[in-house]
């Protein structure tokens, strides 16, 4: 089976740094995605990791440790518009395609 | 705009009625996925197409659900004899299918309410 865990809610201050963790247990691991989802909107792609290490994209960075089944999303210089749900999704190679299995999402609230 | 589009954006129906949703993927994306999302949860995989072939279906997809992608471009998802438990956001995503990353890009979703 598969199990993806991430905190339900987090609160941080504008301008600060926040780290959102994700742990997973799965077979056929083929990469991990982070998506951002504002209320009532579609998930939008943030980052992808398949090898161990850190991927940096502007204010957003994502880290992966395959041996530990662990990833985190790091958001720097937080802005009010970063208030959203952040979804961790594991990609499994199955049936020739790449099915994503999502966690429940971490609702981030950025405060003044 | 060349993103994934879905129609309708909202659908309200009475229990027992049939509904059909449409998804237009990003042009030239070979793969198309349907997911369902309920409040406070992440999207759950329903089914996936490689061109016109439906290659995988989740156990979540009961016999009342059917999806097609007849010409390998747009796709439809039909729910027959809707139940209140079918109320959810139905998300469509597409991916190129030509790289290891194969990022999935999501449409705005169709929000279904079954009364």
Image (cartoon, coloured by chain):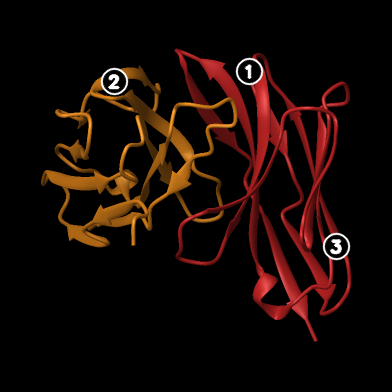
**Closer to the camera: disc 1 or disc 2?**
2
Q: Is residue A54 left or right of residue A34?
A: right
Viewer-proximal residue among B39 and A11: A11
Estimate how packed mark 3 is, as few (under 14), some (14 to 19) or many (20 or more) residues with alpha carbons within 10 Å: some
The verdict on a common chain for dots 1 and 2 is no
The verdict on a common chain for dots 1 and 3 is yes
Q: Residues under labels 1 and 3: Cα distance?
A: 30 Å
Q: Give residue B111's position: percent from left, percent from top.
A: 32, 58
Q: Quadrant of residue B16?
A: top left
Residue picked out by circle 3: A18
Residue picked out by circle 1: A1
Chain at tag 2: B
Report the chain shown in orange: B
Quarter of the figure that contains the C terminus of chain B: bottom left
Residue picked out by circle 2: B54
Label 2 element class: strand
Label 1 element class: loop
């Amino acid at each position: 089976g598969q199990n993806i865990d991430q905190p339900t809610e987090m609160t941080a201050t504008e301008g600060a740094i926040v780290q959102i963790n994700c742990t997973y247990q799965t077979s056929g691991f083929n990469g991990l995605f982070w998506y951002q989802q504002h209320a009532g909107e579609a998930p939008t792609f943030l980052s992808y990791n398949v090898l161990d290490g850190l991927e940096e994209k502007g204010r957003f960075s994502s880290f992966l440790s395959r041996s530990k089944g662990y990833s985190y999303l790091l958001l720097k210089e937080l802005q009010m518009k970063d208030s959203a749900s952040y979804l961790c999704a594991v990609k499994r190679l199955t049936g020739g395609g790449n099915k994503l299995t999502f966690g429940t999402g971490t609702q981030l609230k950025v405060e003044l | 705009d060349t993103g994934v589009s879905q129609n309708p954006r909202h659908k309200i129906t009475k229990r027992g009625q049939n509904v059909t949703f449409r998804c237009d993927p990003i042009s030239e994306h070979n793969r198309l996925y349907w997911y369902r999302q309920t409040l406070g949860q992440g999207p759950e995989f329903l089914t996936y197409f490689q061109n016109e072939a439906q290659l995988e279906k989740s156990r979540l997809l009961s016999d009342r659900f059917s999806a097609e992608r007849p010409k390998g471009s747009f796709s439809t998802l039909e729910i027959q004899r809707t139940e209140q438990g079918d109320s959810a956001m139905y998300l469509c995503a597409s991916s190129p299918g030509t790289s290891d990353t194969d990022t999935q890009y999501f449409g705005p979703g169709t929000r279904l309410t079954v009364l």
